Image (cartoon, helix red, strand yellow):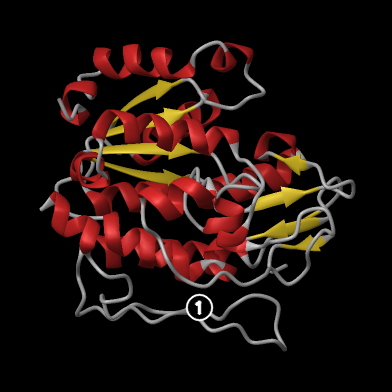
Amino acid sequence: MFDANTSANDTVERACGDGGIEVPVCDSKKKGLEPVTIPEVNNTPSSRFLQVELELNAHLRRLSFSEPVRYIYNPLEYAWDTHRCYVEKYCQGGQRILFLGMNPGPFGMAQTGVPFGEVRSVVDWLKITGEVGHPPDEHPKRRITGLACTQNEVSGARFWGFFRKLCGEPGLFFKHCFVHNLCPLIFIGASGKNLTPPELPAAEREALLALCDIALCQAVEALGVSMVIGVGRVAEQRARRAFSAAGVNVKVEGIMHPSPRNPLANKGWEEVAKVKLAELGVLSLLSNI
């Protein structure tokens, strides 16, 4: 068994780390991080959102996973610095749309702490800064190099590249939208294969996702969004299930996942996404024309 412990322009220019939120410090004698409480005096959307994530982290540390899982990374711990920068910079009041991914990819959020976090998009467009550490135990083929990672992350490059072309500046996108993953953990097999939550043993998967469902409902409440757009069918279906069980009245829609594993996405993901977002009334909010 493996332990899980193992104005728009004003928004863009806001410095990271100015919100008075304490950064978790890694204790080398323990696997992972001690729970951290965000001061109640800072009752902003970003502080409430980060509190939900920290509480989820505390619950996830109690889980354990069996084969085929051999390594578990949680970028909300070792990449907390950059993740906090992302949330403090872009999580703000008035956002009505939440794009929801499933869990981190090995060369995206696992490296940067940002959902769909392809390095060039994170550094050059989102202007995220900060230090990225390491999980307690790393697969030799899946080392964390942080913002220095040179591996291409196609899904993230497609996702953020699309909105960069559409919006021009991050401030326009984040005036209306925020991006989040349902589950913060990445699971890796003995060979270095990335394992998605649907590939986990059923009982372990449901224990994991039950916690993530609760946190998603809390995050939606903290953000005050009215629409969740699942990026991929799995995220969309899970959001529907979570909100239905909790009685949360939020509209759930979905767009195709930009993964290169998806043949349809490889034939023109941007056009498919554009048509769907136009249908949902989102595209007109994000056009810089």
* 109 versus 156 height, above or below: below
**Image spot of residue 52 (x, y percent):** 39, 62
**Image spot of residue 18 (x, y percent):** 26, 77
User: Residue at the left extreme?
Assistant: 7
Q: Residue at x 50, y 36 (%)?
A: 157
Question: Would you say 128 lies left or right of 192 here?
Answer: left
* Label 1: how many Cα within 10 Å (few below 14, some 14–19, many 20+): some
* 254 versus 115 height, above or below: above
Q: Residue at x 56, y 10 (%)?
A: 267
Question: Would you say 152 lies left or right of 55 here?
Answer: right
Amino acid carrying label 1: it is Pro
* 132 versus 265 height, above or below: below
Where, quadrant-wise, is the C terminus in this rendering? top left
Q: Under tag 1, what secondary structure?
A: loop
Q: Residue at x 44, y 62 (%)?
A: 83
Q: Residue at x 67, y 59 (%)?
A: 73
Q: Quadrant of residue 278?
A: top left
State the residue position of label 1.
35
**Image spot of residue 224 (x, y percent):** 21, 47
Q: Is residue 64 visible?
A: no
**Image spot of residue 76 (x, y percent):** 53, 63
